[in-house]
């Protein structure tokens, strides 16, 4: 038995047993890790599937939300512009209630004069020639030019 005990406690035997035990532990730990990894991989795949489903499910409503917010902003801008235009029209209406403003507009745009005033209209000779096309037509009354235009259109 001494030989057996010696063999049992020899360094080589002890190292071999230690290696086998370590290999068994490593093997068991690898199996556990692989089991965890496979479970983790399954969980990760399920989580990825859920996240993708949520993204797909929420993409269209989010796009609609953003486009509606843009439309609301455009409508608010249009409402502000309309309010500004309304204020300008109210101001114009208030000015048109003033007789002095109406008289000034009539004098400027319609060339009205008050009784006793003399109105002068200065015509640039160069501008009159360009506008009329020549002195020949300005010597004639306007209705003659109108009838000539109708006759020339009739000939064509």
Image (tube, helix red, strand yellow):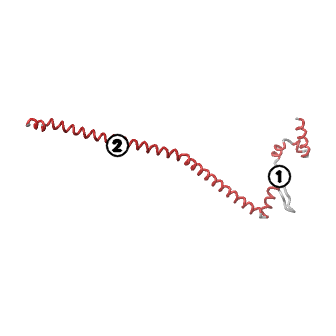
* Label 1 neighbour load within 10 Å: few <14, some 14-19, many 20+: few
Label at residue 33 = none
- Residue 78 rendering spot, x and y as whole percentages: 65, 53
Q: Which residue lies at the image location 28% right of the left edge and 40% below the top edge?
A: 28
Q: Is residue 24 left or right of residue 84?
A: left
- Residue 80 rendering spot, x and y as whole percentages: 65, 56
Q: Secondary structure at mark 1?
A: loop
- Residue 95 rendering spot, x and y as whole percentages: 75, 62
On the image, which quarter does residue 130 sit in? Answer: top right
On the image, which quarter does residue 76 sit in? Answer: bottom right
Q: Whole-Å distance between the Cαs marked 2 and 1? A: 102 Å
Q: Secondary structure at mark 2?
A: helix
* Label 2 neighbour load within 10 Å: few <14, some 14-19, many 20+: few
- Does residue 83 sit above or below 59 in this rendering? below
- Does residue 11 sit above or below 86 in this rendering? above
Quadrant (top left, top right, bottom left, bottom right) of the C terminus: top right
On the image, which quarter does residue 85 sit in? Answer: bottom right
The residue pinned by badge 2 equals 36
Q: Which residue lies at the image location 90% right of the left edge and 35% below the top edge?
A: 155
- Does residue 113 sit above or below 126 in this rendering? below
Q: Is residue 134 left or right of residue 28?
A: right
User: In terms of depth relative to the viewer, which is nearer, 53 or 135?
Assistant: 53
Lower sequence index among marks 2 and 1: 2
Q: Which residue lies at the image location 86% right of the left edge and 59% below the top edge?
A: 118
User: In terms of depth relative to the viewer, which is nearer, 131 or 70?
Assistant: 70
- Does residue 72 sit above or below 48 in this rendering? below
Furthest-front residue in view? 1
The residue pinned by badge 1 equals 122
């Amino acid at each position: 038995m001494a030989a057996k005990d010696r063999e049992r406690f020899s360094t080589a035997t002890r190292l071999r047993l230690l290696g086998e035990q370590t290999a068994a532990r490593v093997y068991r730990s690898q199996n556990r890790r692989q089991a965890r990894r496979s479970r983790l991989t399954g969980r990760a795949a399920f989580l990825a599937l859920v996240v993708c489903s949520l993204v797909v499910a929420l993409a269209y409503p989010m796009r609609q939300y953003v486009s509606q917010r843009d439309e609301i902003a455009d409508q608010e801008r249009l409402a502000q512009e309309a309010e500004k235009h309304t204020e300008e029209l109210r101001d114009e209406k208030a000015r048109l209630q003033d007789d002095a403003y109406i008289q000034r507009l009539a004098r400027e745009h319609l060339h009205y004069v008050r009784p006793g005033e003399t109105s002068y209209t200065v015509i640039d000779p160069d501008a009159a020639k360009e506008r009329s096309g020549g002195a020949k037509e300005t010597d004639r009354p306007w209705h003659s030019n109108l009838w000539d235009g109708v006759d020339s259109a009739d000939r064509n």
